[in-house]
Image (cartoon, coloured by chain):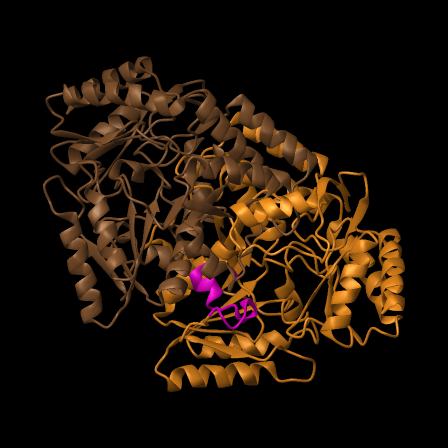
Chain colours: A orange, B brown
Amino acid sequence: MSETLLARRRESLSPSYRLFYDEPLRPVRGKGVWLYEEDGTACLDAYNNVVPAGHCHPRIVAAVAAQTAQLNTHTRYLHQTILDYAEALLATFPAALNRATFTCTGSEANDLAIRVARHVTGGTGIIVTENAYHGVTLATAEISPSLGAKMPLGAHVRTVPAPAEGMDFSAAVRAAIKDLQRHGIKPALLVVDTIFSSDGVFADPPGFLATAAEAIHEAGGLFLADEVQPGFGRTGSAMWGFARHELMPDMVSLGKPMGNGYPAAGLVAQSHVIDAFGQNIRYFNTFGGNPVAMAAALETLRVIQEEKLMENAATTGAYLMAGLKARHQVQAVRGDGLFIGAELADGALASRVVNHMRAHGVLISASGPAGNVLKIRPPLVFTPAHADILFSALDGALADG
Amino acid sequence: MSETLLARRRESLSPSYRLFYDEPLRPVRGKGVWLYEEDGTACLDAYNNVVPAGHCHPRIVAAVAAQTAQLNTHTRYLHQTILDYAEALLATFPAALNRATFTCTGSEANDLAIRVARHVTGGTGIIVTENAYHGVTLATAEISPSLGAKMPLGAHVRTVPAPAEGMDFSAAVRAAIKDLQRHGIKPALLVVDTIFSSDGVFADPPGFLATAAEAIHEAGGLFLADEVQPGFGRTGSAMWGFARHELMPDMVSLGKPMGNGYPAAGLVAQSHVIDAFGQNIRYFNTFGGNPVAMAAALETLRVIQEEKLMENAATTGAYLMAGLKARHQVQAVRGDGLFIGAELADGALASRVVNHMRAHGVLISASGPAGNVLKIRPPLVFTPAHADILFSALDGALADG
């Protein structure tokens, strides 16, 4: 069956599509942290960051079904749910971050942030980390070195090394600012994924981002916290990854987990930034902020809060990190909550481990520029009992080498 | 209630949001061609092109609910529905258009087309019409003059006049190509909405686009048919707007109506174009092509085909156009199927008519550079009886002047 599907993919889809795992997965059903293949094989999902409440959470399924049956229009009509959601969402941010714009994808949210930064600062220069990923639109792909050498970075883009512990991240940002200016390019934006996911997961020490944000502000640019991956409580210690760094972003982009699988994303910004843009430029996203997306997002946020998923991310995350640190083949463990990077000796070993674990029913992936960092970021309903299943599969894979 | 919602919008949403109508609509329920406000007031929807099968079509509602309850993952796993849909979709195109890539929005589809064109041609120059609209990402906003003077067009962008009857459109495209080359910019892409919606709706004479596509091909560029608005049978005469022009696009972008409201969009391309891109560049869109989007899109396509909505668009569209032509205040009627532009004397009159009709329960809008073209594009389940309701509201509005 998988062979047939593979052949059909080659015939009708773009070759831009890539599959996970040497032996691709073919799930037909999902429930909580489990994905099921057609023959009933269960796989423990320790990687899907799009379903914080778990696959097919009944409350969110019901919210999507009910609103789809009742009305699905757009933001050019008045609708109450977009406001209920915007207010509930903004309540999770510091008071200065007080305006929401809704898009369908994190790419669109980051792309909009670039448009806002260009409009507000009059500059075009953008600074990102060396293996950053911020999206698939042209403007976001141009600031995503992790897409590979064949996707050219923009001439207005500078990269800085990922913030490995001990390095002076803000000094690197200051050097990049200087280089932009030396080329006559006015700095517009510093953007970082606040957990540095594609760079290999860097969370510590808390606070290192604050001086980098200061640097871009001094140069007249804005700071965008890309929370598409770390946001909505995944890091356990706070709803938003930037919080650990005690700084105030000008804008925050949101995506993946927002609707527990329903396409929903957005940009939260300080009013003095977004108002300058919005008064001059209209922004209409056909599906962004539609009543069903907002119903899905509102129910997802309620489930995260009422089921205390952030708190669970902290507890289970600590258990996972301690267990990973106890494995002697694991050279370093970085992260926060349920966003964890575990460094192995090299990328080839990490690839074998990922595929061995998949063959034994546990789903994770690897990242970092050398591909040697196991990336573990399960649905936020993951428990220590699930972590034990993961450890058992990991030990089997490491023993198999 | 609307006042309260307006105040809440000002407090929590970006001012980029704009509402339709002097007296904003606040629908709470939708069914077929009808939207209902809280007090039960019914409004005839003659404008929503996102629900070709009508609001809350039971088959599509059921498909979304069922798949949401069963599984919602992504394109990095195998899933059958994306292939069932891709094959059904490609079967509606000429054989050469044989590869699909799925995104969430039409903006993302057009943006991807720009990335493909740059990669494949090595050029950056793009030609669009004077009042074109192609999306809200940075790269698509830069080719969307209809967003207004405060959104700068890219330095690599040239505009050509909208193809009013009698003008030589391909001559204008050739002049734009020459101007790009004179500035050292290699032409990459000619992109047009094949019904020229934001330019004021231009469909005739059939065939005028073919020589323009030839011109961009001769210059080494590609031709993108933007079918986000005219596509999926709306024009009545064919599933795709480009068909009336007897030409073969290199790429076709799809959006709005694809999932009958569920966020779904995509890019269909010739394999020799997209393969050159896809073998070098991976493209992963978190929500694009997910099982629920594909279930929604597949059921929407089936409903369009089984309920013969394209045929209905032709019949009802002809009835609407004849009725509009019979009104002496209507100076010209252009369009095809259920995509109709009706020209009034000026934008102020058109605005009064649109708002008067809204106050009397019929929803349309106005477009064109002068805002004087009534734009009528109802769900494809619109019947002549619905058209009579529209005529009655239109006559009232015109009499009121």
Q: Measured along the vertical axis of the image, is residue B232 above or below residue B127?
A: above
Residue B165 as seen in the image, left or right of residue A361: left
Residue A165 as seen in the image, left or right of residue B46: right
Q: Please state the horizontal and vertical placement of residue A26, each as a whole percent of the image.
A: 70, 45
Write down the region rendered in magenta: A135-151
Q: Is residue B74 shown to the viewer in this render?
A: no
Q: Is residue B182 shown to the viewer in this render?
A: yes
Q: Quadrant of the N terminus of chain B?
A: top left
Is A141 covered by the magenta stretch?
yes
Residue A74 as seen in the image, left or right of residue A328: left
Nearer to me, B307 or A240: B307
Nearer to me, B348 or B186: B186
Q: Please state the horizontal and vertical placement of residue B71, each as a whole percent of the image.
A: 68, 39
Q: Say which quarter of the image contains residue B188.
A: bottom left
Residue sitting at 59 percent across and 57 percent down? Answer: A228
Is B36 covered by the magenta stretch?
no
